[in-house]
């Protein structure tokens, strides 16, 4: 008697965790290319980012969420927290990401967002930085008291260690289903959106810690001519002093941001990019609900 072929699986999986635990790095690692920007600054991710992993037996649609903010309650943070809450509703499974050796009340707040019936994998990140490996098992026991996890995977999103094992565990949780996206699609986000995100990433990376996170990037024009793209972006800041930080002495900082963003766009889009950047002050926009809606935050 011949065996029936294995069924194809497909579904939605949320990656959740507090700010700066490595969710976007993990998403990019699993997808195999950059679909979500990264930096050392907390809450670099501000929007729901979908990354698609397609293999012969399954398609996993990952949802990378903003880090759930428990320290600050400003209008922007409230909007980001709503995005997290909305992202975990209706998923087939979830990955709770924590940093090895660190679990506290902020992680518990994130965990409480998940409905009880969502099967959840505990992903312990940055194990490569854990100095005393003997502390890992007691740490796992501590976190397991908070929820019943279907699997626990220690990993390093930075190096890729154990990321394949995580993906295998995720696939086992998905329902039998046809693919949800085309085989060659890695994200549902447009080039226009990705261009803005790449500019914002370079701002975060090149301005260091002196610039607050309240910086937004708006694509004003995005024109395609063959494999060439002409892109004009507006960088929005909340204070005049922040504008000076981004422009830098003689415009040097803004030029560096534009150069690095353009090179990343050319690699991502596969063609020449002509990028213009301008900086505008929209005073305290991150605390203004009307301004937040104008820049795409619900």
Image (cartoon, rainbow, N blue to C red):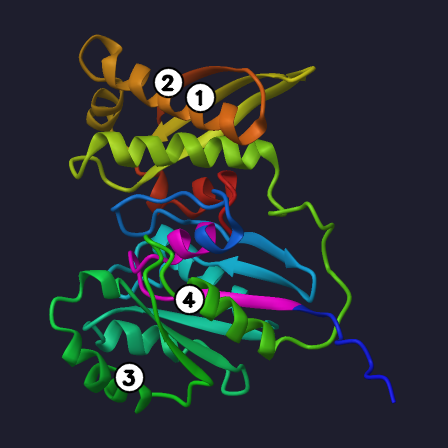
Check residue 101 for magenta coloring: no
Which is nearer the N-term, disc 1 or disc 4? 4
Q: Which residue is drawn at 50% across and 30% down?
A: 195
Could you say where residue 257 lies in the image, as x and y percent from the top left?
Answer: 33, 23
Question: According to the image, label 2 marks what residue?
Answer: 259
Q: Residue at x 30, y 38 (%)?
A: 284
As drawn, which residue projects farthest toward the left? 132
Residue 283, visible in the rendered structure: no
Question: According to the image, label 1 marks what residue?
Answer: 262
Could you say where residue 56 lies in the image, as x and y percent from the top left?
Answer: 70, 61
Which is nearer the N-term, disc 3 or disc 4? 4
**Mark 2 vs mark 4, CA separation in Å:** 32 Å
| First to last magenta residue range | 11-28
Question: According to the image, label 3 marks what residue?
Answer: 143
**Neighbours of disc 1 within 10 Å: few (<14), some (14-19), many (20+):** many
Question: According to the image, label 4 marks what residue?
Answer: 16
Q: Label 3's element?
A: helix
Q: Label 1's element?
A: helix
Does residue 188 sit above or below 81 in this rendering?
A: above
Does residue 273 sit above or below 158 in this rendering?
A: above
Which is nearer the N-term, disc 2 or disc 4? 4
Could you say where residue 180 lies in the image, as x and y percent from the top left?
Answer: 73, 59
């Amino acid at each position: 008697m011949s065996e029936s072929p294995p069924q194809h699986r497909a579904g939605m999986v949320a990656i959740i965790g507090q700010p700066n635990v490595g969710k976007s790095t993990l998403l990019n690692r699993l997808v195999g290319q950059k679909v979500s920007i990264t930096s050392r600054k907390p809450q670099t991710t501000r929007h729901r980012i979908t990354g698609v992993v397609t293999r012969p037996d399954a398609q996993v649609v990952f949802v990378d969420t903003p880090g759930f903010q428990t320290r600050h309650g400003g209008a922007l943070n409230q909007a980001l927290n709503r995005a997290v809450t909305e992202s975990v509703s209706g998923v087939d499974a979830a990955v709770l990401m924590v940093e090895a050796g660190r679990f506290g009340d902020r992680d518990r707040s994130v965990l409480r967002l998940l409905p009880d019936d969502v099967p959840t994998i505990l992903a312990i990140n940055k194990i490569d930085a854990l100095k005393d490996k003997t502390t890992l098992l007691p740490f796992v026991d501590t976190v397991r008291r908070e929820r019943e996890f279907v699997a626990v995977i220690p990993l390093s999103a930075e190096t890729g260690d154990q990321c394949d094992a995580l993906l295998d565990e995720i696939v086992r949780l998905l329902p039998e289903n046809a693919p949800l996206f085309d085989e060659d699609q890695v994200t549902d986000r447009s080039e226009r959106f990705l261009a803005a995100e790449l500019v914002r990433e370079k701002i975060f990376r090149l301005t260091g810690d002196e610039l607050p996170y309240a910086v937004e990037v708006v694509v004003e024009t995005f024109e395609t001519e063959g494999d060439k793209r002409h892109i004009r972006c507006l960088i929005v800041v909340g204070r005049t002093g922040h504008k000076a930080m981004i422009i830098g002495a003689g415009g040097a900082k803004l030029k560096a941001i534009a150069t690095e963003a353009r090179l990343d766009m050319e690699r991502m889009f596969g063609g020449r990019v002509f990028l213009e950047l301008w900086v505008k002050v929209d005073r305290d926009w991150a605390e203004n609900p009307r301004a937040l809606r104008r820049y795409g935050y619900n």
